[in-house]
Image: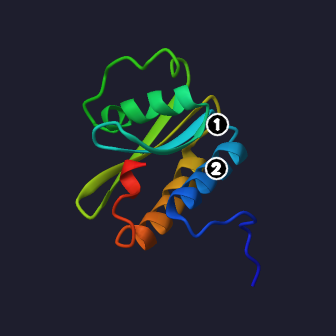
Amino acid sequence: MYDRRIRRSHDPYSALCLQLESSRVKGELDAVVVAIDNGLLVAGAGERSICEALGAVAPLVGSASFDGRLPSALEGQSVQVHCMSFEGETVYVATVGRGGGDAWLRQSVGGVRRILGSSWQADPQLLVN
């Protein structure tokens, strides 16, 4: 069987960062992040300031009632957010960039589900990194 993943890690945080970076590079995106309800950045790929801005607004943009302004670091770009639930926690996966981030958002969501699903019980402190 062929495994397309070249770089791997058994550490959930490192695996998450590798998966996000792969989606960011392949999708030619500025950033891909995972954040929680309060906007705390769990993991990200891209320039740190963009990741932090994206993580902070992901819960807001992910809500159906959002009609506010994006931070200047994100203005003029396509921001896409997907929210999901793990063990009662809402987790947001978000992308930002000028290209079509939708396909890469779906890929990231699948990877995040796989990584968090297998590590959530093993490492409950993952979300405070």
Residue lying at the far bottom of the rendered structure: 1
Residue 62 location (% of width, % of height): 34, 39
* Residue 13 higher or lower than 117, as above or below: above
Q: Nearer the viewer, residue 24 or 127?
A: 127
Tag 1: amino acid? Leu
* Residue 72 higher or lower than 31, as above or below: above
Residue 29 badge: 1
Secondary element at tag 2 = helix
Nearest to N terminus: mark 1 or mark 2: 2
- How many other residues sit within 10 Å of disc 1, few (<14), some (14-19) or many (≥20)? many
The residue located at (37%, 52%) in the rendering is 127
Applied colour scheme: rainbow
Classify residue 40 as left or right of residue 44.
left
Residue 14 location (% of width, % of height): 57, 57
The quarter holding residue 108 reads: bottom right
* Residue 44 higher or lower than 65, as above or below: below
Classify residue 8 as left or right of residue 50.
right
The quarter holding residue 29 reads: top right
Residue 6 badge: none
Secondary element at tag 1 = loop
Residue 23 badge: 2
In space, the residues marked 1 and 2 are separated at their CA atoms by: 8 Å
Tag 2: amino acid? Ser
Q: Nearer the viewer, residue 106 or 111?
A: 111
